[in-house]
Image (cartoon, rainbow, N blue to C red):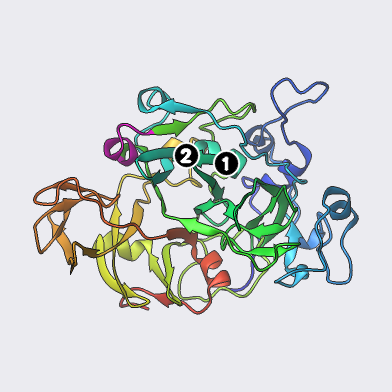
Amino acid sequence: MKKGLLLSGVLLVVLILATCVPGKEGAEGQEEKTIAEAISENTPFPTAEANLSPKIADGGIPADVAREFTTDFSKHSVPLDEILSGGPPKDGVPSIDDPLYVSIEEADQWLEPVEPVIALKLGNAARAYPIQILIWHAIANDVLDGKPVLVTFCPLCNTAIAYDRTIDGKIFDFGTTGRLRYSNMIMYDRQTETWWQQATGEAIAGELSGKRLEALPAALISWKDFKETYPEGDVLSRETGYDRSYGENPYSGYDDIHHPPLLYDGPDTPDILSPLERVFTLETEGEAVAYPYKVLEKERVVNDSVGGQEIVVMWNDGTASAQDSEDLAMGRDVGAANAFYRELDGRVLTFSLDGDAIVDEQTGTTWNILGLGVEGEMRGRQLRPMVGINHFWFSWAAFRPETRIYGSDY
């Protein structure tokens, strides 16, 4: 598959964000228009070649970048001409910096069972970050169980990733640059204005170039699975201080596998999979593996070894696509995947299907998508989670071209 740009009138997100970014509630003198409203007007959308904003080149930076950022672009770990404008200015997609939370019961009033959420558990604390919120904000700067965390979602790549936002003992806060590399969001930290790649956690331009954020195990699962596993958990509130149409989907129709990715300017995508096919990815001890969702849907459970580690990948149905329907809760069922180390109490477990249930062959315990033993000898025990990340295939292939693809057909 060659490089491509999605030109569908339904997906006019980038230019719309650049020109119609809503501000805080009550922003004086500003006529607000939501992305969804602008999309419904079928606003014309240029291709990347139309140069919404010039690319950053090694020989200089565009005037808009110079006005917005104090970043030291003389330090960079990737070619700067791989970076292009996604349309919005700095913080045009506003991060959530003062998050509020609600209970499971309160969130149940506005979250449907199939809606995707990012589930993050640290210590005894578990929190759900609904995609219906993060799809409008991309970033939440938060603290969970005393740890400063960065919870992110890039809808163009389908990458939902959580990071520790402490670097060398210092806490950093993050915002959006409005720029993309390989169609993936570039973040910046507000302390040094270094630019960071969301998909990899790598500092790619600025004072901290070469540093890398520590990724945390976070699962993209259904609201139903979260609340059943963590009934005492809490949920990111829709009271963000911004006026957004939470629950509406500004990216409806984007994940049609027959379309090329939006604003992608990078390496040619191998034809092994369609560019917008979902893959669940693992990387450990120098080995990278992609598990196509269409294979996981058939097998449901995969015992594998990655980087010398014995692991299991689990899949279940019941999670809606975040890039399908205008009503996010009505998105088609794409399921959810998660991964865990198979060693527990000094022995390596082997997992298989018993009807619709995932069980281990050593004890017969039934396990759920969050690695919790729900029935049997190990009921209440927790498998050690891995950092597994969802991508669209084009995104993973661009950032990790040396990857093993699981499945007999590949």
Q: Amino acid at mark 1?
A: Ala
Query: Taking 126 as reference, is 355 left or right?
Result: left
Q: Quadrant of residue 108?
A: top left
- At mark 1, the secondary structure is strand
Residue at position x 69%, y 40% from top?
Answer: 42
Up-down: is 326 above or below 293?
above
- Image quarter (top left, top right, bottom left or bottom right) of the N terminus: bottom right
Residue at position x 74%, y 69% from top?
Answer: 76
Residue 349: in sight, yes or no?
yes
Magenta residue check for 66: no
Residue extending farthest front: 169
Up-down: is 311 above or below 185?
below
Q: Are there few (<14), some (14-19), or many (20+) residues within 10 Å of tag 2?
A: many
User: Which sits in the foreground, 145 or 73?
Assistant: 145
User: Which sits in the foreground, 358 or 163?
Assistant: 163
- Image quarter (top left, top right, bottom left or bottom right) of the C terminus: bottom left
Q: Are there few (<14), some (14-19), or many (20+) residues within 10 Å of tag 1?
A: many
User: Which sits in the foreground, 23 or 373?
Assistant: 373
The answer for how far apart the CA atoms under marks 2 and 1 are is: 9 Å
Residue beneath disc 2: 129
Residue beneath disc 1: 140
Query: Taking 301 as reference, is 94 left or right?
Result: right
Residue 115: in sight, yes or no?
no
- At mark 2, the secondary structure is strand
Residue 222 picture location, percent across and down: 36, 42
Q: Amino acid at mark 2?
A: Tyr
Residues rendered magenta in the picture: 225-233
Q: Are marks 2 and 1 in contact (CB under 8 Å)?
A: yes
